[in-house]
Amino acid sequence: MTKKIAVFTGTRAEYGLLYWLLKDIQADADLSLQLLVSGMHLSPEFGLTYQQIEQDGFCIDEKIEILLSSDSAVGTAKSIGLGVLGFADALARLKPDVLVILGDRFEALAAAQTAMILRIPVLHLHGGEITEGAYDDAIRHAITKLSYLHCTSTEAYRLRVIQLGESPERVKNVGAIGLDHLKRAQFMDLHMLSVSLQFELHQPYFLVTYHPVTLGEEEPEAGFQAILDALDDYPDHQVILTYPNADDGGRRIIPLLEAYAAQNPSRVIAIPSLGQVRYLSAVKYANAVIGNSSSGIIEVPAFDVPTVNVGLRQQGRLSARSVLHCKAIKAEIVSAMNAAVTRSYKADGEVIKNPYGQGNASRQVIDMLKKMEFHPCKKFYDL
C-alpha cells in the first residue's frame, strides 16, 4: 500500500533545502507526495515563490494563506492562529500517513501542533540546534516534542534531541539535507548567473542576507545599516542583496535594502528570492557571504567560501572555522570581512571541515519514512 507523505513548506529557504527530498518522494513507487505550501510562498511582497515550486514540477495540493500585512509580534502570533485553522482543514482533507517539517519557523509550529492533535506523525528535520538570537530556537524545540521521527544534521544535535526525551531509535543523524545539492544539483556559471539575474555580475562580490533578530537587543534597521556601512568600505566589490524573511521586523529592512541598491545601480542588485540553485551558484563564486542566515553556517562552508556571521541570530549553532562571527556594528563587521577577503582564518591549501555532513541525507530520510511504524502513545525517554 502506498504511503502518503505530506511535506510542508512556508519559505523559499526551507523549500530549497527540501528540494531533493521532494524529488525522491515523488519518484518512489511506494510513496505518494502531498505538498502543503504556505507563508512567504503565497505573498507578492516576498516574490510569490510558490510559482517556482510549480515550475520545478511539483503539484501543490494545498495552499494555506496565513500571513498578515503586519510587521509586529502580534501579527506573527495571529498568523500562527490562522495557520492552525488552515492546516486543520488541509490535513483533514489530505489524511497523510506522515507530515515532514523542516526547521523552526512559526509557520512550521502551526503545522506541527495541528498534525499532533490530528494524530498525524511528524518527521522533523534539523531538530536539536541552537539559535539563541531568535524565537525560532524555542519553536524548534517545541516542534521536537510535537514530532515522532527526527533527522538531525549533526551527532551533537541528535544527542540533544534524545536529551529532550525522544527515544534514540526514532532519532537519526543524517546530516544537513540542503547539502544534497552539492552532489546532485547543476550550478550556473558566472555568465549564466548574470543572465538569470539580468545584472552584469563580476568578481569580486559579496552575497548578503540579513534577517531580523527576534530575541535580544539588535534592532533590524540598525543591524542591517551596519552591514551597509561596512559594504561601503569595499567599493570594488559588487553586492547581491536578498530580502529578509517574514519575521516581525523584516519589512523594516526592505526599504533600506531597496534604497541602497537604487543608490548603487551598477554595483548592487536587490532581489526578493534567488531560489536554491541561483543562491548556491551565487555562493560558489562569492568572495564572502555576509549576514545572519543559517545557510551561511550550514551550507556555505561546503563551498570553501567564508561567512561573516553578523549579530545574535545564529548564536549557539555549531560552525566551521570559515564562519567568522562578529557583532552587528560596523567596525567588527569590517574586521571580519577583512579576514574573509584575505582568507587569514586558514592556512594555504587547507580544506575547512564542514560539521554538517556529506550531502546524502535525502535517501536516509526516505528509508526512515518507509520503515516507520507509528505508535501514538509516545513515551518520554529518560537518560
Image (spheres, grey):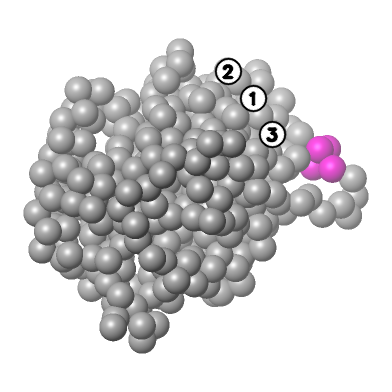
Q: Is residue 9 visible?
A: no
Magenta run includes residue 173:
no
Q: CA distance from mark 2 to mark 3?
A: 14 Å
Please name whichever residue, 270 or 278, is drawn nearer the observer in this view of the structure.
278
The answer to whether residue 52 is above or below residue 149 is below
Tag 2 secondary structure: loop
- Which residue position holds label 1? 326
Write down the region rendered in magenta: 341-346
Res 329 label:
2
State the predominant SS element of the stretch in magenta.
Answer: loop
Residue plotted at (38% across, 65% down): 373
Q: CA distance from mark 1 to mark 3?
A: 7 Å
- Which residue position holds label 3? 324
- Amino acid, disc 2: Ile
Query: Do tag 1 and tag 3 residues touch (Cβ < 8 Å)?
Result: yes
Which numbered disc, 2 or 3, marks the residue that appears first in the sequence? 3
Tag 3 secondary structure: strand
